[in-house]
Amino acid sequence: MAGIAFTKGHGTENDFVLIPDPEDRLTLDEELVRSICDRRAGIGADGVIRVVPASGDAVADGARWFMDYRNADGSLAEMCGNGARVFARYLVHRGWEAPGAFEFGTRGGVRSAVVPEPGTFGEVSIGMGPVTLGPESWTDLAGRHWSGRAVDVGNPHLACFVDGTAGDLGELDLTRGPVFDPAVFPAGVNVEIVVPAAAGPDGVEGVRMRVHERGVGETRSCGTGTVAVAAARLAALGRTSGTVDVHVPGGQVRVDLATGDGRVFPESVLTGPAVLVATGVLQF
Ligand SMILES: N[C@@H](CCC[C@H](N)C(=O)O)C(=O)O
């Protein structure tokens, strides 16, 4: 395949190669995705997002575009929160959506975006849909055994809270993937290790996390992971709604969770930066 236009972007340093495909002509196989994401022999990214017109039920639900997201290893995922912000920013940058609020399709269902005017550096918000807390579970990661809470944000997460400092978190070796309970996570899992962080000047709850992503490895941020961690944190505090600032190695995002029943938060909003870095042409 030759001459495929792309844009590189990131959200809190979780980085993506966006491939516009407005006529829905391209087939992205696993090998091509892996080649694109290769940090030495390719462009380098945590994932690839094909930008393609929405179809079927998503159109009926108001979506004009579909986020065809793939992990760096070529696997499909239901949802990508940081990717969604970058995708939404890109649609406005191209003039394919007007600034403001719009809907778009994902494998996890239709999601909403609010994007500022092009050329501004304001943050992007994504309506991330419902968040459902699951059972307690465990993982073996970085040479330790961790307990955590399963959380479904459209994709699967295990949020593991520990007493520790940013320094303790920084010392973990996340180069190897987690061992986990396949009965709880039959399709694999994204694992977050979380420590407390100081509340912000506005009094908002803070946490700090690192993540090992399914299909990628350690990344500098995971948007769905930040939503999972915020939901698990509020639930552990006995709260049924609230706002959490989540610090990740690549920056900071804010998560707002609407009032639920203690197990399901019916709606969540992820707000953070979304940056378009470069455009070019793939020569694979
Ligand atoms: N980085 C993403 C999550 C991407 C998908 C994940 N690796 C999975 O397989 O579920 C995010 O920002 O949410």
Image (tube, rainbow, N blue to C red):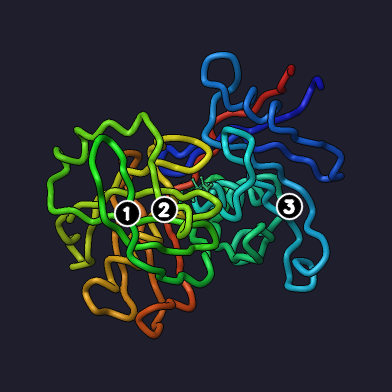
**On-image quarter of the C terminus:** top right
> Above or below — where is 94 with respect to 235?
above
Q: Three-letter amino acid code at disc 3?
A: Trp
* Tag nearer the camera, 3 or 2: 2
Label 1 Cα crowd, 10 Å radius (few <14 / some 14-19 / many 20+): many
Q: Residue at x 73, y 65 (%)?
A: 63
Name the foreground residue: 279 vs 158: 158
Which residue was labeled with disc 2?
181
Q: CA distance from mark 2 to mark 1?
A: 7 Å
Name the foreground residue: 159 vs 85: 159
Which residue was labeled with disc 1?
138
Could you say whether the residue bearing mark 3 is in a helix, strand or loop?
loop
**Residue 59: image location, x then y, percent:** 79, 67
Label 3 Cα crowd, 10 Å radius (few <14 / some 14-19 / many 20+): few
Q: Which mark is residue 96?
A: 3
Does 76 sit left or right of 246 as displayed? right
